[in-house]
Amino acid sequence: MVNTPTLKPGNLSNSQRRLRGLSLLIGLAILCWLPFEDSSEIWAVSFAAFVLLLATTALILRYLGVSGMAWWLLPLSGLAAGLALTPLAILLMAIKTGIHSHSVPDFTPEQMLRVLRAAPIWTISGLVMGAGIVILIHRAKSSKPDSKVNRND
């Protein structure tokens, strides 16, 4: 079991405060987007990507300082975020359509299929981004003059 410090509301780091602020902003942006008569799926996909980026960043920040964190957790978290992007975007599209309840839905079946067809791209992109973060962290650790990099990881 990983020992992570429990954080009290007044004991948040700067990065956690920024993350909380960004989470509130993305939530407000979604609430502002819902009532508009917009039928472009790009907003639903973008909002889903931002929400998952914030969630993944929060997890990474929480466990990044934990000693013994396996290197494969970052690509795995990117893969999970990529897998979750399409269902979250479809859910946002369904919520928006349900709120408006027109006789003609806000998003056409073709738009929904376009988002579904992009699922493999998002999954691979998440995996590659997670692997890229691992490489950046490894390079940052190996570029420090007094760091000892374990080559067997």
Image (cartoon, helix red, strand yellow):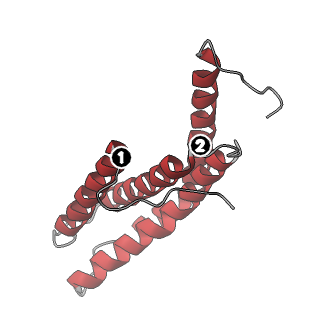
Q: Earlier in the sequence, mark 1 or mark 2?
A: 1
Rendered position, 78 above or below 137: below
Q: Amino acid at mark 1?
A: Ser
- Picture residue at 70% right of the left edge, 44% below the top: 68
The residue pinned by badge 2 equals 130
The furthest residue to the top: 145
CA–CA distance in space, label 1 to label 2: 23 Å
Rendered position, 109 above or below 79: below
Rendered position, 75 above or below 107: above
Place of residue 92 in the rendered image (x, y in percent of width and height, measured from the top left) = 36, 71
Q: Amino acid at mark 2?
A: Gly
Q: Quadrant of the N terminus?
A: bottom right
Residue 23 appears in which quarter of the rendering? Answer: bottom left
Badge number at residue 81: none
The residue pinned by badge 1 equals 13
Q: Tell whether 64 sits left or right of 36.
A: right
Badge 2: few (under 14), some or many (20 or more) residues near its Cα, within 10 Å?
Answer: many
Pick whichever, 45 or 32, lies toward us: 32
Rendered position, 151 above or below 68: above
Residue 11 appears in which quarter of the rendering? Answer: bottom left
Place of residue 90 in the rendered image (x, y in percent of width and height, measured from the top left) = 43, 71
- Residue 135 visible in the picture: yes
Tag 1's secondary structure?
loop
Name the mark nearer the viewer: 1 or 2.
1
Place of residue 21 in the rendered image (x, y in percent of width and height, measured from the top left) = 25, 53
- Picture residue at 56% right of the left edge, 50% below the top: 63
- Picture residue at 50% right of the left edge, 52% below the top: 62
Badge 1: few (under 14), some or many (20 or more) residues near its Cα, within 10 Å?
Answer: few
- Picture residue at 65% right of the left edge, 52% below the top: 76
Place of residue 40 in the rendered image (x, y in percent of width and height, measured from the top left) = 29, 60
Pick whichever, 52 or 40, lies toward us: 52
